[in-house]
Amino acid sequence: MIHATLSPFIQLFDLEKQQYVIQLNMDNTTEGESNVWYQSFKNFTARISSDGKEIITGTSRFLNGGAKLLIYDVEQKKLKKSINAHQNDINSICYVDRENSSLIITASDDGLCKLWDTRALEAPKPAGIFYGHLSGITYVSSREDNRYFITNSKDQSIKLWDLRKFRTDETIYHHFWFDYRMEKLSTVEMEKIKKAMSINPNEQSVATFFGHQVYMSLIRCHFSPRANTDQRYIYSGSADGCVYVYDILTNRLAAKLDFNEEKTIRDCAWHPFEQSIITTDFSGKICKWDHVDLG
């Protein structure tokens, strides 16, 4: 297992031995030497390949502009690639398919998702750019079918994307910034966002889902399990203390799991074979939801 701690370091933990194995320094720049925390190098997100030989991370934005996509060789303990991938913090990163580490998706506070092919990084350009969100992206998750992925955003939407539908050129796009940690969008502001999306000439997503709230934290979203739902649903935590489950086939809300406590649910996990969901929230509770009538 690996984890990042808003620092230049990635920690490797051996689950069998129940101990930390090594600490990897991902920073090969002098910029990370700043004594000011918000100017220093930080890993915001990290993933390890299925064979354990490679780690990918997305970093904070540097003062001179740009956040980096880093590719690290675990066996050689060497940084293989460092790419200025986005204009703002990379909040989330994932492999398109965990069994094939050549395709990577990055999601940023600049409101863009980018597809990277590690087999063609001599020129540090993405294979594709996905336009559609109007604010920072908090999470990206792949369906791992080499076709679809989803993103959660501070514009209060989840978007479903087709990997085959992207742009290769950069273009001017609308970006709505607000401090989601302390501000909430009004009903009027939300209607403006929905209208802007409906007429957005750069819109490339397959579907958009509204209802959940993305405030206070980088709230995550996932596809439901393949074994018992055939990945028909998208589910997400929410700042109102609920779990929202959306039906991809109907583009509608399929279920809302309400704990009657308005504590932000940052993340949730659906059991791979059973109708159970685990949630973690800002009150410190870990909750299990059973017998959700979805299948």
Image (spheres, helix red, strand yellow):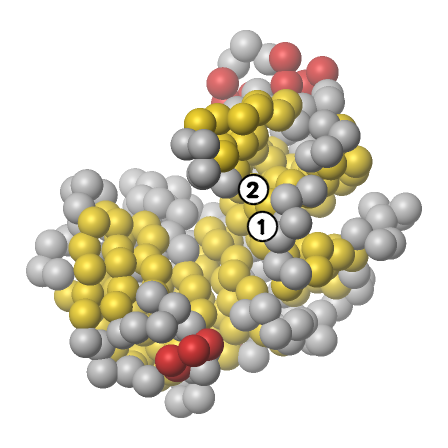
Q: Residue at x 76, y 30 (%)?
A: 76
| Amino acid marked by disc 1 | Ile
What residue is disc 2 on? Answer: 46
Which residue ends up furthest to the bottom in the rendered image?
Answer: 250
Left or right of 83? Residue 229 is left
| Extreme residue in the left direction | 260
Say whether residue 186 is visible: no
Image coordinates of residue 286 in percent, x first then y, are: 20, 49
Q: Which residue is mark 1?
A: 93
Residue 52 appears anywhere in the view: yes
Please report the residue visible at 32 percent of the width from the left and 50 percent of the height from the top.
266
Q: CA distance from mark 1 to mark 2?
A: 7 Å
Whether tag 1 and tag 2 are in contact, CB under 8 A, the answer is yes
Decide which of 138, 288 is in the foreground and name it. Answer: 288
**Residue extending furthest toward the right:** 122
Give the vertical position of 145 relative to 265 (above or below): below
Question: Looking at this rendering, what residue extends furthest in the top direction?
Answer: 35
Q: Nearer the viewer, residue 34 or 223?
A: 223
Nearer to me, 68 or 4: 4
- x, y (%) of residue 85? 71, 44
